[in-house]
Amino acid sequence: MKMWTREDWKALFSSDSRIPERAVSTVCFAVIDSETTGLDPTKDRILSLGGVKIIHGRIAVRDTLEIFIAQDHFDASSVPIHGILKTGPNARIPEKQALVQLGSYLEDAVLVGHHIGFDLEMIRQARGRHGLPPLQNIALDTGRLYRKTLLKTPLLPKKPSYSLDELAKKFDISCKDRHTALGDAYITALAFMHLLGQLNIKSDTSLRDLVRMAR
Amino acid sequence: MSNRIVERVADFLRRYPPFNELTAKDLKHLSSGVDILYKDKGTYIFKENEPAHDFFYVIQRGAVALRMGDGGEIIDICDEGDLFGLRPLMAGENYKLEAVSQEESILYAIPISEFRPLIQSYEEVGNFVIESFASNTRNPYSRFTNADSIGLLPPRMSIRAETPFTEILPIHPRKDLVFCTPQTPAQEVATLMTAHNVGSVLVLSEGLPEGIITDKDLRNKVVTGRHPIDAPASEIMTRPVITYPAKMTITQAQLAMMKNGIGHLCLTEDGTTDTPVVGILSKYDLMLALGNSPEVLLRAIKRTRKIKRLKPIRNRVEYLLKGYLENNIPMSITMKLIAELNDACIKRVIELSLRKEGKAPVEFAWLAMGSQGRGEQLLHTDQDNALVYEDVPEGESEKVQQYFHQLAVRVNKGLKTIGYEYCPADMMASNPNWCKPLGAWKKTVTGWIHNPGKEEVLLSSIFFDFNFTYGTRSLVTELSNHIFSNVDSYPMFYYHLASGALQNPSPSGFFRQFLLEQDGEHKDFFDLKRRVLMPFTDAARVLILSHQVRSINNTAERFEKLAELEANNREFFLSCSYATKALLKFRTKQGLLHTDSGRFIALDTLSKEEKIKLKRTFKILKELQELISLRFKVTSRVL
């Protein structure tokens, strides 16, 4: 099986032809976030996954995803951030089962995440370990979308990257449950909806135009 | 099943009725079925005649306007925590109104299928639903549950014109009864009425209504001397009490009062005097339910028991204001009435804060400054205020200061709750510099007058427009006497005040085009306040003070007085007064239109006529500034 390289991901983000012309209002967006043991996709592991779906500006609370993954790799230094201990109250499932569950939750939804490249890379590595093919979903990064909303002015230079905290502050979203996968996915989902409003994305805007914007 | 988001939803809902009645388990279950909606500003949630959704809505963030079909009159504006769109669901009807997000909003859509069982299992929830239908508003808790809480009433005309509103509207009597026994002495009865601020007291014996004592009874029977002041209630009461059943509509109640020539209805369980009293309904309660008149609003303000309940009343004041402007009621009357109502709100906030903080250790006075002090504040703008208290002996000063600081912090916070933003320059009583004993104030003011720099002129100008709001008036009088005696001995002060009045940049450029703001947040907007209103205000102040007139704070009235004092400039000052009123009206209309302070104006939104009117005031302003420059021998870079 072919391993996906960074170039492949770039291609995935930029190939217009496979992005349908569908109106944004008909698209199912799945906002995802992962908590990991660290920042190195080759060594670190996913601790938990969270997902929230948005269809036509609407989140169904029932249709959310939160999975905790049983660990053998463990990095004590990241515990203070996410608070997921090696053994905790939340039921954990084996990594492979979690990935399959994630896949069936996502189906062909358009993925949305804050700095989603990292989450996708973590998932890609994990799937690779279990011989699963990479996800083929189209992906949007709220970090990039946010940069598009900022004014172009030499007085206010854009930062290379904006944290989810900065977005939450900007859109006045409560940071309750920050640093849990589902909590972050939810905050990202609300931020994403605000961003669509700010970027003047109407319900009949095509998905292709939206993806172009997020580049 | 994941539930972090469910908890988030539940945490929000449990703060608002009727969800506060639910057990944690039921609330969690209900929350898990919720959809979360994002609505950009100006998008529809539903339209008139659209079939009812499977959901009703609670606003988590933002605001939603309910309007008559197709962009018609706004009936109601729902705020965070408000619930709407329930009635058609229960009645199985199409939507009768349309709902549009007024700003970026997040809504919780709650499935009716999950909610319906709760109506049956919780009595409180059921009552909430029934009441919200009957009263035709979204939230019965925001209104009428006791006589001093009233919510946003829909603008009167639209409702009256469309539906026979009052025909079906049920009455909401006062349930916290004020009553006495037949043995209670008259004086005690009067004390009771004063304490509760009511106009009538029921005389109950064994829970049944025996008679009623109203203001009129006290006047006719006691004050006239026909009965002694310690006469028992049974001797002075009116009996038998005219009783009615509690289930009646407002129209029926009105008829009942007219028919019997009485101002209070006693409501009993079955409408006879043989069953216990369930409530009392006064004419005022009826008027409250029926509409907005300044007297009714004033009364409502005085009866309010919680600061946050003042907010909906203030919103109604805004409706009143809109109506006045639309009907071209003279601006001088409008200003007076609205200022009166605003004043009453502030007074009430102070009274309620005093209840929390306990009695003040020494006498004090609360001062409104700036536009409120001049009686020109029509819209919700910033709060500018100060507090002065009696001088206290050295040893106690710290404790007393501590008390007043805490009081001021509470009042400032309360004022913010009801819609006055904090002053960006921190000119508020909660700032220790603006909350001082009389002696310290005198020293401060003397300093300003003797060494007027640019800053001092600004500060003292505020102090010439203050208005006494609450407390002991003599403290204010003494301070103001002090200020004036000082000014008299330092005539140079007028020179500085006059040059201060000429500091603001002129409104139009060389070619008579409007000068727009060059930078900042309001770039390319016209700053109506700084460029036109303030120069008029400043000019009126220095002119009237130089005439030693100190009792008038209002700018338009100051110009009128000037017209009276200076016969040769009469026409000119009258036109200044007119221009001031026109500008204030213009600003208020702009503010109402854009729901802001009306200070910054986008010129392209103005009609040609409006622009011409504005420019006319510029010409008057220019002449006014020339007059000041000549009279006080000030040269200005502006002219």
Image: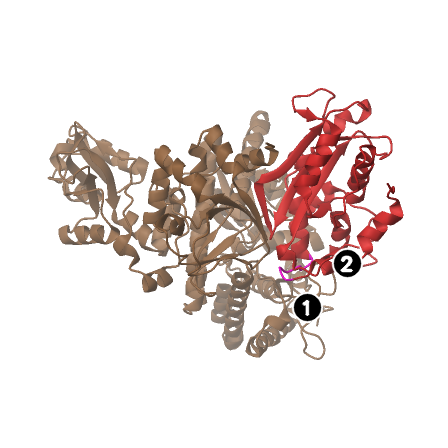
Q: Is residue B404 left or right of residue A136?
A: left
Foreground mark, 2 or 1?
A: 2
- Where residue B41 sits: x, y (%)? 58, 57
Disc 2 secondary structure class:
helix
**Cα–Cα span, label 2 and label 1:** 65 Å
Can you say whether B244 is above or below B620 in the image? above
Q: Secondary structure at mark 1?
A: loop
* Three-letter amino acid code of the residue under disc 2: Arg
Colour-to-chain, brown: B
Q: In the rendered image, which quarter contains the N terminus of chain B?
A: top right
Label 2: how many Cα within 10 Å (few below 14, some 14–19, many 20+): some
Q: Which chain is red?
A: A
Quarter of the image with the C terminus of chain B is bottom right
In the displayed structure, does residue B240 sit left or right of residue A199?
A: left
Above or below: residue B416 compared with residue B522: above
User: In screen coordinates, is B495 left or right of A42?
Assistant: left
Residue B543 is drawn in which quadrant? bottom right
Residue at 35%, 36% in the rendered image? B120
User: Looking at the rendering, which quadrant does residue B69 occupy?
Assistant: bottom left
Magenta region: which residues?
A199-204
Residue B45 percent location from the top left of the image: 51, 55
Q: Position of residue B364 (x, y in %)?
A: 49, 38
Where residue B155 appears, as percent x and y from the top left, is: 39, 59
Q: Main secondary structure of the magenta part?
A: loop
Between A156 and B586, the residue placed more toward the observer is A156
For the residues beneath circles 2 and 1, the answer to whether they share a chain is no
Q: Is residue A41 magenta?
A: no
Identified at 81% across, 35% down, the residue is A131
Residue at image coords 13%, 39%: B272
Q: Residue furthest front?
A: A1
Which residue carries the number 1 mark? B633
Q: Looking at the rendering, which quadrant does residue B403 occupy?
A: top right
